[in-house]
């Protein structure tokens, strides 16, 4: 693996850095420098404005083909963009469940019509996608889901019944992608179909609910005999074939647990902020902090850098045709636990002032969800042990 960047890649980095240096302050100024969480109603609208700014500059999906709004950039250039984006303090991507989870699956399993319609509108933040995975009795054990889709050949479509929950930003989205049981006699991984559906159909109710941190982006989605016609989307609403939902969903979870959703740029930028926080505190009073905090800061920075290097190897493997497969569970364990450690160290440095420090406290609250979403870390350890290390089940 060659760790040096080409002249073209360095120029790409410079172009991205220059654009962000102009575009980010302009976006903040449009909203009077009062940027709210993207998981609130007002904040989501602010972030959509930013998403469309990214799209207009062809930075929303830099690695996608130009026909879909991208720059046809390499995966290496995508990593460079992510590094610069988070270094500049770019905001959370409220379109991420579509762009980083559904889109790779559409590229792999979608037909030409689905790709042409879904991807362009997704990149432009015209259609906003949420993920219909979890149910009241099906979380990390996704195969136990009970939401069903019944075929209606007379009308040409599907009748949906059931409930999805913990739907991130579902309160603000226009479309949902998810798994439904289409064979009523099937069990577990069989008889599932991956469906795409608009949320404004009769029989679909989206009920937002608040989180402990005050944000209200989560939602429950209820399907009560909702009819989804085959032509609700060009190319159809089934992604990857009827009854093939589990294999299609595993492609999505691989993206969710791997580098696509959580690029190393995010954690390297957080580690750099942590170093700056520690240095600023020591500069004020060299004896104010527990000596052990220095080691934790250094450890956090090293682990973020190690994740960056590991990701470069992952991209190298991908470029040479080697798939991460179940090894993506290791990646999920890494970034989720790293995120918690970085923020806990920051709060310990701040001490009582942590309750007054919005960014670090808010970041810590979100980091705590990392070991839960995208498949709990307990499940990921089982997957890694059985499918990667070959250890026996108990």
Image: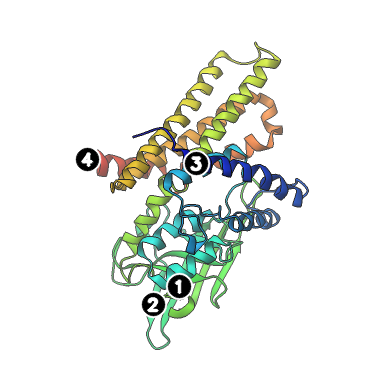
The answer to which of marks 1 and 3 sits earlier in the sequence is: 3
Q: Position of residue 160 (x, y in %)?
A: 45, 74
Identify the residue under disc 2. 150
Q: Residue at x 47, y 53 (%)?
A: 100
Q: Residue at x 41, y 63 (%)?
A: 106
* Of residues 130 and 149, the one drawn nearer to the viewer in this rendering: 130
Distance from Cα at disc 1 to Cα at disc 4:
38 Å
* Of residues 339 and 136, the one drawn nearer to the viewer in this rendering: 339
The answer to which of marks 2 and 3 sits earlier in the sequence is: 3
Instruction: Tell me the quadrant of the picture where the N terminus can be found.
Output: top left
Q: Nearer the viewer, mark 2 or mark 3?
A: 3
The answer to which of marks 1 and 2 sits earlier in the sequence is: 2
Q: Nearer the viewer, mark 4 or mark 2?
A: 4
Identify the residue under disc 4. 390
Q: Nearer the viewer, mark 1 or mark 4?
A: 4
Distance from Cα at disc 1 to Cα at disc 2:
8 Å
Residue closest to the far front: 7
Q: Which mark is residue 161?
A: 1
The answer to which of marks 4 and 2 sits earlier in the sequence is: 2
Q: Position of residue 20 (x, y in %)?
A: 63, 44
* Quarter of the figure with residue 151: bottom left
Instruction: Tell me the quadrant of the picture where the C terminus can be found.
Output: top left
Distance from Cα at disc 2 to Cα at disc 3:
45 Å
Q: Which mark is residue 80?
A: 3
């Amino acid at each position: 693996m060659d760790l040096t960047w080409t002249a073209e890649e360095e120029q790409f980095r410079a172009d991205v850095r220059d654009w962000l240096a102009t575009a980010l302050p302009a976006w903040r100024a449009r909203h009077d420098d009062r940027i709210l969480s993207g998981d609130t109603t007002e904040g989501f609208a602010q972030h959509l404005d930013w998403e469309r700014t990214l799209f207009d500059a062809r930075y929303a999906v830099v690695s996608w083909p130009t026909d879909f709004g991208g720059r046809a950039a390499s995966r290496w250039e995508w990593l460079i963009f992510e590094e610069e984006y988070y270094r500049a303090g770019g905001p959370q991507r409220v379109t991420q469940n579509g762009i980083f989870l559904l889109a790779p699956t559409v590229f792999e399993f979608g037909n030409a019509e689905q790709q042409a319609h879904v991807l362009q509108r997704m990149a432009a933040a015209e259609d906003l996608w949420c993920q219909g995975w979890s149910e009241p009795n099906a979380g990390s054990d996704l195969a136990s889901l009970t939401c069903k889709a019944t075929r209606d050949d007379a009308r040409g479509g599907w009748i949906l019944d059931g409930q999805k929950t913990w739907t991130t930003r579902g309160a603000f989205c226009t479309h949902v992608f998810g798994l439904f049981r289409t064979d009523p006699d099937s069990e577990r991984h069989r008889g599932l179909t991956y469906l795409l559906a608009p949320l404004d159909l009769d029989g679909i109710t989206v009920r937002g609910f608040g989180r402990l941190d005050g944000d209200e982006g989560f939602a429950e989605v209820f399907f009560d005999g909702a009819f989804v016609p085959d032509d609700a989307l060009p190319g159809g609403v089934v992604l990857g074939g009827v009854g093939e939902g589990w294999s299609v969903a595993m492609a999505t979870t691989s993206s969710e647990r791997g580098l696509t959703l959580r690029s190393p740029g995010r954690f390297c930028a957080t580690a750099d902020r942590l170093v700056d926080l520690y240095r600023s505190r020591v500069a004020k009073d060299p004896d104010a902090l527990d000596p052990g905090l220095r080691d934790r800061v250094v450890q956090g920075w090293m682990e973020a850098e190690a994740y960056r290097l590991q990701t470069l190897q992952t991209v190298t493997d991908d470029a040479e045709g080697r798939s991460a497969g179940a090894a993506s569970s290791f990646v999920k364990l890494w970034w989720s636990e790293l995120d918690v450690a970085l923020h806990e160290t920051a709060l310990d440095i701040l001490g009582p002032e942590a309750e007054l420090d919005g960014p670090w406290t808010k970041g810590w609250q979100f980091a705590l969800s990392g070991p839960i979403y995208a498949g709990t870390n307990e499940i990921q350890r089982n997957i890694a042990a059985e499918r990667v290390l070959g250890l026996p089940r108990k």
